[in-house]
Amino acid sequence: MRAAVIDRFGGPDEFRIVDDAPAPSAGAGEVVVRVSAAGVNPLDYKIRDGSSGMASRLRDEDFPLILGRECSGVITEVGEGVTDLAVGDRVFGMAPLDNKGQCYAELTALPADALARSPEGVEDTTLGGLSLVGLTAWVAVHDLAEVTGDDIVLVHGGGGGVGHLAVQLAAATGAQVYATASARNAERITAAGATHVDYGQEDFAQVTPRPTVIIDCVYFGTYEPSLDHLAEGGRLVLLPSLADLGPAKERGIEASIPTIAPDRERLDALASRVADGSLTLTVADALPLSEVARAHQILEDGHAPGKIVLAVAGE
Ligand SMILES: NC(=O)c1ccc[n+]([C@@H]2O[C@H](COP(=O)([O-])OP(=O)(O)OC[C@H]3O[C@@H](n4cnc5c(N)ncnc54)[C@H](OP(=O)(O)O)[C@@H]3O)[C@@H](O)[C@H]2O)c1
């Protein structure tokens, strides 16, 4: 099958496209999906360059390695014990953390319970990039920060993959939401019901009230000043998995990092909001699989205005 592979950890140039990668088969509890679109996430480039904790668990025999933790597509094979999904179903979802996640490919095998049916009327390009950022934003806003209509929420990186969904989920609770982002993201943030703070022009600590919740999707350069700005008793959610909670804890601040596990109920909840228009996933760019290196470069540059997706089918 066609796939994007790397032979070793390194830069985006490590990718090569092959047409003879071994096709997966569905193990017990799994299905094989013919991938239509695969989402690109910072975790992917952190595995690609070897800096993620998940990279350290990989062995020589895992190479050539296929990356990609989420996708949308159509089921082509159903493994033993799978009774609630069938061949031909349109699905989307993401690999759990203990699964290699090999979605930059024509076919991928994923646990059936990490997938949900794709709603009518929502494009595969959107659904291919929804799961990881959607579940992360959900855990950050609802499970960890427990945002309510009484909160003042500040989201750092409100134009990015996780950030733009966190802004919308927080605003939907009735909370007062502020989001830092560059000027080009201003319109989307305002449309989501939040107040845009242009971090290039303004100091968020000067122009926003002291927030009861900060969701920090940036971390570098935003973490320390956020500790000073957070209201007494406020909650802080830091996105990068390797973020250092120490400085927050030393000051008695309740701080946490999301850990996500795909579950169908939440995927359904996210997809139905996208289908009814109450949640918008902005696809900043949908590139063909052959341009996977460029997709990684755009994301790694750190200013993608939304989600980067690989359109795998139809190349
Ligand atoms: N813990 C977890 O389970 C989990 C899950 C998903 C992601 N993550 C982590 O969360 C982080 C964000 O992921 P993502 O997918 O949202 O990345 P992303 O799509 O690359 O978004 C990052 C955003 O930050 C903005 N930005 C850059 N510098 C900024 C600054 N100084 N102030 C405010 N905004 C700034 C960028 O846009 P502009 O500068 O143009 O506004 C960009 O839109 C990554 O570190 C990722 O690894 C963790």
Image: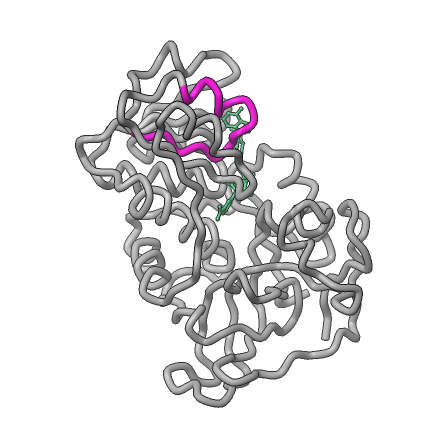
| Horizontal and vertical percent position of residue 33 | 55, 75
Q: Is residue 222 magenta?
A: yes
| Horizontal and vertical percent position of residue 60 | 79, 64
Compared to residue 267, the image places residue 75 above or below, namely: below
| Horizontal and vertical percent position of residue 128 | 51, 59
Residue 176 versus residue 224: which sits nearer the camera?
Answer: 224
Q: Is residue 223 magenta?
A: yes
Relative placement, left or right, of 220 versus 61 is: left
User: Residue pushed farthest front?
Assistant: 250
Residue 247 versus residue 226: which sits nearer the camera?
Answer: 247
- Identified at 36% across, 12% down, the residue is 207
Compared to residue 186, the image places residue 172 above or below, namely: below
Which image quarter: residue 68? bottom right
Compared to residue 246, the image places residue 221 above or below, namely: above
- Identified at 65% across, 39% down, the residue is 300
- Identified at 43% across, 25% down, the residue is 180
Q: Which residues are magenta?
A: 213-227
The N terminus appears in which quarter of the rendering?
A: bottom right
Compared to residue 66, the image places residue 230 above or below, namely: above
